[in-house]
Structure formats: structure tokens, C-alpha cells
Amino acid sequence: MLSALKYLRRYTLPTFGVFLLLSVDWGLASLASCAGSKQQQTNKCAEEYYGLTQAIFSRFLGWLFDAIDSHHGLVTAAATIAIAWFTWTLRQSTDQLRMESEGQRNLAKETAERQLRAYVYLNISGRAYPPPPNLPDRASISLEIINGGKTWAQNLVVRHFWVVNPKGTDPFADTPWGTVAQHSRVLGPEQRESQQFCDIGLDEFREIAAQTKRVYFMSWITYQDVLSDPPITRQTQLFRRLNTDNEGGISFSWMPTHNCADDGCPK
């Protein structure tokens, strides 16, 4: 194959170049003769030019067919190479389109899962108790678990603690989470449930307002969404500090860590 290509480059292409130059030179000489003769009419010159062009083209075709007939094996090899090159480039383009299509399909699937999967988050609230028309004498602190997603949260496990005057710098990390009984449940889309933390009496209100008592509330939940295959265990953490005032006001401060979800939570 390489020797045939070398032959084509060494002999056939130069021969074609010489033939083309001679044909052009002959055509230009004939046109010059026609233009220089005052006895020739314009129409006759045009006919001669057309005939000259046709003769050059016919001679080129004759040379081309002779070359193909003389080097049939070389032409077949060149055609095979061209077909192979075209087939290879077509396959490359097809593979690229397939990869892009698979990427778009996977992206659409991931987007749909993110939009539809369960998102369970936590909140903490306090209300005066007993409710009106009774005179309240304490605040009832509750944990709220809400599924803000479009599908069920399964194997939901809720753990929560409240700590008074902790000694460590990270009460959440110091909490014995493994001692909590783990009972799994399901939580439907847009559903919520509440669990009781504790009651804070009037005396404790004054101590917390005077900064002589520090009370922290924390919760850690794990769950799985029904769309992931295999199931992926997700998590949400909550960590707040209780604040009160002497007028009965109540609020919860966000702690700098452990208010997070999934991979955003500390390891």
C-alpha cells in the first residue's frame, strides 16, 4: 500500500500537473490568436473558445479514465482508505452524540430526583401553656419534623436532647446519641409531626434571662427517600440555644455548627 502511494506521488501527480499546464498554455495561445486576428468575428471567436474548453475537459477526462484503468489496484486501495476514514469519522461522531445524549438523560434524571425526593427539615417552637383563657405559667418547647419534599421519607429515625449548663465546648458532639432508642417510621410528602422537648417554668425563665442558666436543644434525624436506588441515608441536624426575657418573651439562637443537612454536616 505504501509503495503504491509513493508511486502515485512520484509519477502520476507530476504527470497530471504537466498535462494541465500544457492544456492551459494551448488554450491561452489559441485565445490570443483569435483575439489578434482582425478578420475573425466575435461570434466565431466565442465558438472557438467553447470548443477549446470542451476539448481540454475531454482530454482531462480521457487522461483520468486511462489513469484509473492503468492503476486499478491503486484506485481501489485509495477508495478503501477513503471509505475507512469516512466510517471512522462517522463512528466518532456517533459515539460523541451518544455520550452527550446519555449525559443529558442522566442530568434530567438527577434533576427530577432532586425536585421530587423527600426533604425532611427541623424546627423548634415554644408556646405558652396552658393556653388561654387560662393564665400560662410555663412554656412548652416542641420539636417539629417537616417533610417538604414530594415523596415519602422512609426509615425516619428522630433523636433529640436538651442540655442544661453543659461543660464541654460542643454540647452536640458530647451528647450520647447512641443511647437513644431508634424507632423508624415514614413521613409523607408535605406532612409534619411534633415531639415534646420539655416545659420551662417561670423561675427558669428568670434564670435564663439573667444568664445563670444555659439551655440547649438539639436534634439529629436520619431518613431515606424512596427514589434513590440503592437507598441513600440522608440526615438533618438542629442545634439551638434558648433565650428568654423577664416579660415572658422566648426565642432560639442558631448555634454556629450542627444546623445542617446531608453532606453539609460535620463528619
Image: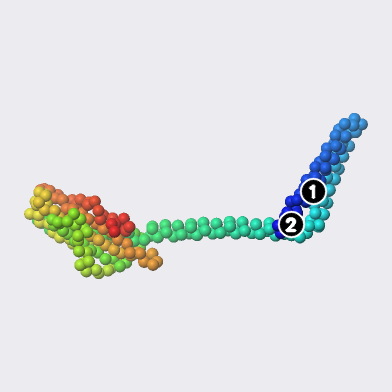
In terms of depth relative to the viewer, which is nearer, 167 or 42?
A: 167
Residue denoted by label 1: 15
Residue at position x 36%, y 66% in the image: 231
Q: Secondary structure at mark 2?
A: helix
Which mark, by number, is residue 4? 2
**Separation of disc 2 and disc 1 at Cα?**
16 Å
In terms of depth relative to the viewer, which is nearer, 134 or 120?
A: 120
Observer able to see residue 18? yes
Q: Secondary structure at mark 1?
A: helix
In terms of depth relative to the viewer, which is nearer, 92 or 20?
A: 20
Residues marked 2 and 1 touching at CB (< 8 Å): no
User: For mark 2, does the 10 Å Cα neighbourhood hold few (<14), some (14 to 19), or many (20 or more) residues?
Assistant: some
Observer able to see residue 126? no
Quarter of the image with the C terminus is bottom left
Residue at position x 83%, y 45% in the image: 56
- Residue 72: x and y in percent read 78, 59
